[in-house]
Amino acid sequence: MDKATCKFDGCANDGRLRRGLCGKHYQWVTKHGKLADYDRKLIHTDATLDERLRHHGWTVTESGCWEWKASRNGNNYGQLATGGTRPMLATRAAYTAWIGDLPEGAVVCHACDNPPCINPAHLFAGTHQDNADDMARKRRSANGERSGVHKLPDANVDEIRGLYSSGAYLQRELAEAFGVTQSAVSMIVNRRRRGRETNPPLPKTVRLSA
């Protein structure tokens, strides 16, 4: 959520909540009966998804993405309160509000590969498998040295294969030299593991504070 200055004259404190006032001046105007002079900032409880999306808003990028301006989760996807016990993904809210109901079991996928985007022109419904296949096709998945599971960088993987193919080293010798198990070396040289190079890192996006 973008920072907004308190609406009380001369105050530079954060006024994103409490009708655009900071805590100190919210208490002051309440005490003096002037609260009605400041518009309510919280959306009403029976608001539609469209109203909730527009209440928080988005920023249009050069690529045409509508990047969610409010709270985001750890994966950089927008989220918003809809009256339930858990927040709803902004992409799911946008799809439902502006495209239609999602088929049972479907997820919302991005054609633009930009998690905070809620532009309905960039969203499509698919299965979890569709989403996984799309990630693999576009090389967005965290494989190889990016996965956090494999301890060897791509350069070491190539070196192991080269050394083993030379016939000068046994698998157990390579395992000891590179600090992995012999079974790991076996799977590497037989290309049952690390069969393709690591995908490039995803482009970094600026995460707005909640």
Image (spheres, rainbow, N blue to C red):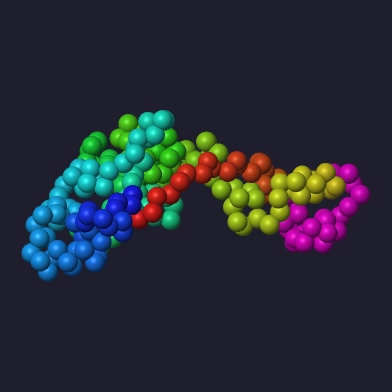
Where is residue 178, by image quadrant? bottom right
Residue 130: % across, % down: 42, 40
105 part of magenta stretch: no
Work out which residue is located at the far right of the displayed protein and give it: 168
186 part of magenta stretch: yes
Work out which residue is located at the far front of the displayed protein and give it: 10
Q: Looking at the image, can residue 83 be seen?
A: yes
Q: Main secondary structure of the magenta part?
A: helix
Q: Residue at x 23, y 37 (%)?
A: 98
Q: Nearer the viewer, residue 97 or 193?
A: 97
Q: Looking at the image, can residue 20 be seen?
A: no
* Quadrant into which the C terminus falls: bottom left
Q: How many marks?
A: 0
Q: Residue at x 86, y 55 (%)?
A: 170
Q: Which residues are magenta?
A: 165-188
Q: Residue at x 17, y 66 (%)?
A: 28
Where is residue 202, by image quadrant? top right
Q: Nearer the viewer, residue 85 or 100?
A: 85
Q: Residue at x 83, y 56 (%)?
A: 174
